[in-house]
Image: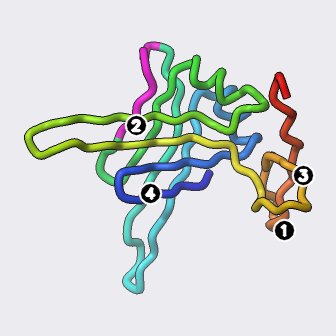
Amino acid sequence: MKIRIRDDSLRLRITLSELESLQRDGRLESQMRCLTSRGPGGVFRYGVAVDSSRRESEAEVQAFEVRLVITPSDLAALLDPSREGICLQRESCGPDGSHRFCATLEKDRPAASCEKPEEWIYQDRPDHRPETRPIPLRRGN
């Protein structure tokens, strides 16, 4: 799983094999262990969990941890072979102005070019060459 955090946005990218694990186990977790010149410097955890009791998907942030908790319907949308991912957008307006937050959970794919077919990354192999699966055409195309 890859993570990107920028200002008020969070993006998690998962391979198709990780999506299969999420579907099977109901959760997917990764961590970054920081090592310093003095030794261990801490652990940052990130992941995705499916929660059937939720009415809507949410991002949860705690000390040294961020997790997207998604509904079964968002998991079903993510499992659609033609869908790239799901997006959670929140906006609030208060005395200090408006604030926006966006979290996305996307299927990972190789870098794009005009010569390459559109593919999802199924899994990253030890030799750093991804194993891929074709992206099916969307219905109606």
What element does badge 1 sit on?
Answer: loop
Q: Is residue 127 left or right of residue 40?
A: right
Please state which of residues 96 and 8 is positioned toward the viewer in this rendering: 96
* Residue 64 in the image, given as x and y percentages of width and height: 35, 54
Colouring rule applied to residues: rainbow
Q: Mark 3 points at which residue?
A: 117
What element does badge 3 sit on?
Answer: loop
Would you say the magenta stretch is mainly helix, strand or loop? loop
Q: Nearer the viewer, mark 1 or mark 4?
A: 4
**In which quadrant is the C terminus drawn?**
top right
Mark 3 Cα-neighbour bin, 10 Å: few <14, some 14–19, many ≥20? few
What element does badge 2 sit on?
Answer: strand
Q: How far apart are marks 3 and 4 (CA)?
A: 28 Å
Please state which of residues 85 and 95 is positioned toward the viewer in this rendering: 95
Q: Name the residue under label 2.
A: 59
**Residues at discs 3 and 2 in contact (Cβ within 8 Å):** no
* Residue 117 in the image, given as x and y percentages of width and height: 90, 52
Q: Which residue is drawn at 84% across and 40% down?
A: 135
* Residue 85 in the image, given as x and y percentages of width and height: 63, 37
Outermost front residue: 141
The mark nearer the N terminus, 3 or 2, is: 2
Please state which of residues 7 and 34 is positioned toward the viewer in this rendering: 7
The mark nearer the N terminus, 4 or 2, is: 4
Q: How far apart are marks 2 and 1 (CA)?
A: 33 Å
Please state which of residues 33 and 59 is positioned toward the viewer in this rendering: 59
Q: Mark 1 points at which residue?
A: 127
Q: Residue at x 82, y 23 (%)?
A: 139
